[in-house]
Image (tube, rainbow, N blue to C red):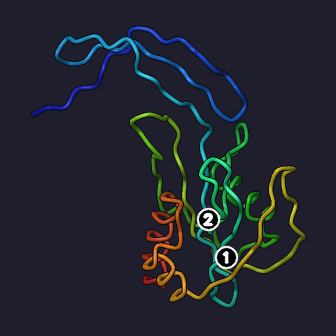
């Protein structure tokens, strides 16, 4: 069976803010049914980093996430600002969040966080040769700890369900596949 795209008949914005936009679309499905209340979240695109120090340790960050009310162990990353390229954004985010600079930077994955209800993408990069070159330059609302783990420790953390952020677990699996190629 051929899967066809829906036809967007109309859109109305309900919220337009810096970090998120909510619109409601009227869509026509391939079978002719019209749905007048399909909600879409528009977020900026994001970057994630699977970052290895010069000693081969994986850099992770631990921070509070208010929406889920958890302290979360994650990979470094963040929002792509304006017209930044994803590669520039991931290097900037790493420097701001961790203070590390890297020898190599390779694109390894592009994922949609939730294509059913949001339109943004997350770009994942694999960086090696990390060296601490700067102090953290955190945003006003960021409070995070930088932690280093061996590859085996990260595998164990995933296996023990200690990393709750789904996009970050996916990024780590792509990163672990890259490590196996080294």
The label shown at residue 49 is: 2
Residue 53 % position (x, y):
69, 82
Q: Residue at x 62, y 67 (%)?
A: 75
Give the vertical position of 43 relative to 11 (above or below).
Answer: below
Decide: marks 1, 2 in contact (CB < 8 A)? Answer: yes
Q: Secondary structure at mark 1?
A: strand
The label shown at residue 59 is: 1
Q: Residue at x 54, y 86 (%)?
A: 151
Q: In the rendered structure, which disc, 1 or 2, sits on the residue that comes first in sequence?
A: 2
Q: Which quadrant, please, contains the N terminus?
A: top left
Query: Relative to the observer, which residue lies in front, 122 or 130?
Result: 122
Residue 68 % position (x, y):
59, 52
Give the vertical position of 152 relative to 113 (above or below).
Answer: below
Q: Secondary structure at mark 2?
A: strand
Residue 106 % position (x, y):
57, 66
Does 72 sit left or right of 115 as displayed? right
Q: Residue at x 66, y 58 (%)?
A: 77
Residue 94 % position (x, y):
74, 64
Mark 1 and mark 2: span between their CA atoms? 9 Å
């Amino acid at each position: 069976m051929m899967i066809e795209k829906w036809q967007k008949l109309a859109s109305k914005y309900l919220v337009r803010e810096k970090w998120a936009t909510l619109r409601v679309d009227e869509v026509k499905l391939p079978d002719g049914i019209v749905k007048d209340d399909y909600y879409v979240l528009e977020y900026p695109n994001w970057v994630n980093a699977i970052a290895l120090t010069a000693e081969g340790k994986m850099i992770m960050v631990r921070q509070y996430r208010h929406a889920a009310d958890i302290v979360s162990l994650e990979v470094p990353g963040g929002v792509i600002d304006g017209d930044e390229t994803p590669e520039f954004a991931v290097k900037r985010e790493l420097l701001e969040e961790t203070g590390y600079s890297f020898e190599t930077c390779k694109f390894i994955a592009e994922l949609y966080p939730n294509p059913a209800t949001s339109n943004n993408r997350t770009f994942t990069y694999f960086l090696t040769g990390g060296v601490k070159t700067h102090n953290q330059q955190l945003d006003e609302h960021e409070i995070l700890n930088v932690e280093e783990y061996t590859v085996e420790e990260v595998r164990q953390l995933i296996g023990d369900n200690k990393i709750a952020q789904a996009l970050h677990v996916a990024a780590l699996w792509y990163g672990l596949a890259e490590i196996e190629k080294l």
